[in-house]
Amino acid sequence: MFDGIKNERNMMIHYSVVVLVVVFGVTLKLTVTEWGICLILCGMVIALEQVNTAIEAVVDLVTEEHKELARLAKDTAAGAVLVAAITAAIVGGLIFFPKLAQLFGL
Ligand SMILES: Nc1ncnc2c1ncn2[C@@H]1O[C@H](COP(=O)(O)OP(=O)(O)OP(=O)(O)O)[C@@H](O)[C@H]1O
C-alpha cells in the first residue's frame, strides 16, 4: 500500500484528511447522506493515489528513458489525483462551511 517516500507522504496526507473529516463529521453531526458523500470522496482520492503510484511504477518498469508517452502517462495520472482532491475539497467545503458558520454564529 505504501511504496516510496513521496507516495508514503502523499498517503499520510490523505489519511490525515480522512481523520480530520471523521473528527469534524462527528463533532458537526453530519447526516447519513453527508457521511456517504464524504466517504466516497475520501475513497476516490485514496484509490486514485494508488492508481497513480501503480502507473508511475509501470512507466518506470517499461522505460527509464525520457519519452513523451511516459511523461503523458505520469502527468495524466497525477492530474487525476489533483482533480479528485480539488473536487473533494470543494464538496467538503460545501458540506462543512455552513455547519461551521452556524456553530460560530456567522
Ligand atoms: N520516463 C519519462 N519520460 C518523460 N518524462 C518523465 C519520465 N519520468 C518522469 N517524467 C516527468 O517527470 C515528472 C516527475 O516524474 P517522477 O517519476 O519523479 O514522478 P513523481 O514526481 O513521482 O510523480 P508525481 O509527483 O506526479 O506523483 C513526471 O510527472 C513527468 O512529467
Image: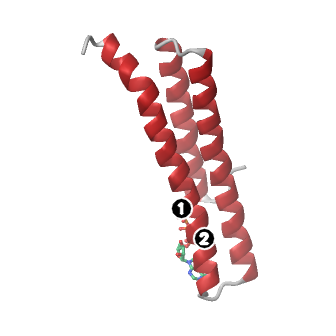
State the separation of the CA atoms marked 2 and 1: 8 Å
Q: Residues within 10 Å of mark 2 (few under 14, many from 20)?
A: some
Q: Quadrant of residue 52?
A: bottom right
Q: Nearer the viewer, residue 96 or 11?
A: 96
Where in the figure is residue 80, as x and y percent of width and height?
A: 58, 58
Looking at the rendered structure, the secondary structure element under dot 1 is helix
Q: Is mark 2 within 8 Å of ligand 1?
A: yes
Where in the figure is residue 43, as x and y percent of width and height?
A: 65, 39
Where in the figure is residue 56, as x and y percent of width and height?
A: 66, 68
Q: Is residue 63 left or right of residue 16?
A: right
Looking at the rendered structure, the secondary structure element under dot 2 is helix
Q: Residues within 10 Å of mark 1 (few under 14, many from 20)?
A: some
Where in the figure is residue 49, as x and y percent of width and height?
A: 63, 53
Which corner quadrant holds the C terminus? top left
Work out whether mark 2 precedes mark 1 in sequence or the reverse, and give the earlier one: 2
Q: Is mark 1 within 8 Å of ligand 1?
A: no
Which three-letter amino acid code belongs to the residue tagged 2?
Lys
The residue depicted at 49 percent of the width and 28 percent of the height is 20
Q: Quadrant of residue 5?
A: bottom right
The residue depicted at 56 percent of the width and 62 percent of the height is 78
Q: Which mark is residue 100?
A: none
Which three-letter amino acid code belongs to the residue tagged 1?
Gly
| Figure disc tally | 2
Q: Return the residue at label 1.
A: 79
The residue depicted at 44 percent of the width and 39 percent of the height is 90
* Quadrant in which ligand 1 is drawn: bottom right
The residue depicted at 68 percent of the width and 47 percent of the height is 47
Q: Indicate which label's residue lies in the foreground, 2 or 1.
A: 1
Q: Do tag 2 and tag 1 residues touch (Cβ < 8 Å)?
A: no
Q: Residue furthest left?
A: 106
Q: Return the residue at label 2.
A: 74
Q: Nearer the viewer, residue 49 or 7?
A: 49
